[in-house]
Amino acid sequence: MQAVGDEALKRILLQQLRGLQRAGVSGLPSTSATAAPAESTPQVSPTPKPTPTMPRRTASPKKGDQKQQLATLCSTVASCTRCQELAETRNQTVFGVGNPNAQVLFIGEAPGADEDEQGIPFVGRAGQLMDKIIEATQLKREDIYICNILKCRPPGNRNPSPVEAGNCREYLDGQLAIVNPEYIVCWGAVAAQNLLGTDVAIGKLRGTFHEHEGAKVLCTYHPSYLLRNPPMKKEVWKDMQMLMAELGLEAN
């Protein structure tokens, strides 16, 4: 049988190495030139390094730092072209608005036509309904930080695709790390499922607090859903009462 040449052997070994890397193997146990005795301690492959993630803020930044950090991140988002279709069809990105050191942070799904026009989240009919809900809780919109899963409007107001949500996740995580809220309210299934990494229906997610990076997460129906289904407003009010009880607030 003809011996395998050095170059061919290198190609075979390289293909096998790439296959191991795709399978998640980042290291192999070391071996000596001679066989180890049967009673020797077995070698253990090193644990693959975790994928780096943006850390949560562990110490309160100096006064004004959050505002500057958000402004820097907003500038990065404004030039983002990760999602070609969204970058080509948007009027502008819709980053976020509100108190950069908010105790409560709201997350929606994506900008609509009005938001795409004004560059501010929740300013259309759904946003006007949200304002009424906020007022009823004795909170103030300017005391809350408000953002979306996506920073660009999907054409036709369709739901964000998983790829789009994944492309934008770094920006959402950045906002959460900078603001570092105690409470997060996810408005609608898209926001709740993307933040929590679940496919559980919004009806089953609401009514209780979840946890994300040390913050308490409350899931409820999106205001646009309430515009189509007014009887469900009472369910959202129940969710808001849970938040109010946590904050020590009484309804107006």
Image (tube, rainbow, N blue to C red):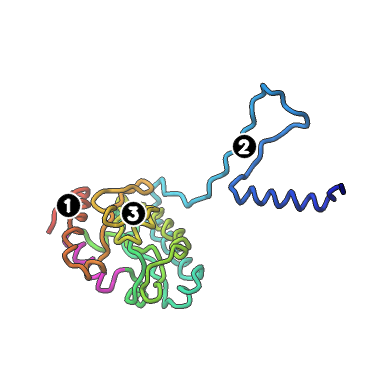
Q: Residue at x 25, y 63 (%)?
A: 141
Q: Is residue 162 magenta?
A: no
Q: Does residue 242 appear left or right of residue 155 in this picture?
A: left
Q: CA distance from mark 3 to mark 1?
A: 30 Å
Q: Which residue is mark 3?
A: 200
* Residue ID for mark 2: 45
Disc 2 secondary structure class: loop
* Kind of element beneath mark 3: loop
Q: Quadrant of the C terminus?
A: bottom left
Q: Is residue 239 left or right of residue 94?
A: left
Q: Which residue is mark 1?
A: 249
Residue type at the position of mark 1: Leu
- Identify the magenta region: 122-136
**Could you tell which of marks 3 and 1 lies nearer the N-terminus?**
3
From the image, state whether disc 2 or disc 3 is nearer to you: 3
Tag 1, which secondary structure?
Answer: loop
In the rendered image, the vertical position of residue 50 relative to residue 154, given as above or below: above
Crowd band around label 2 with a 10 angstrom C-alpha radius: few (<14), some (14–19), many (20+): few
Q: Earlier in the sequence, mark 2 or mark 3?
A: 2
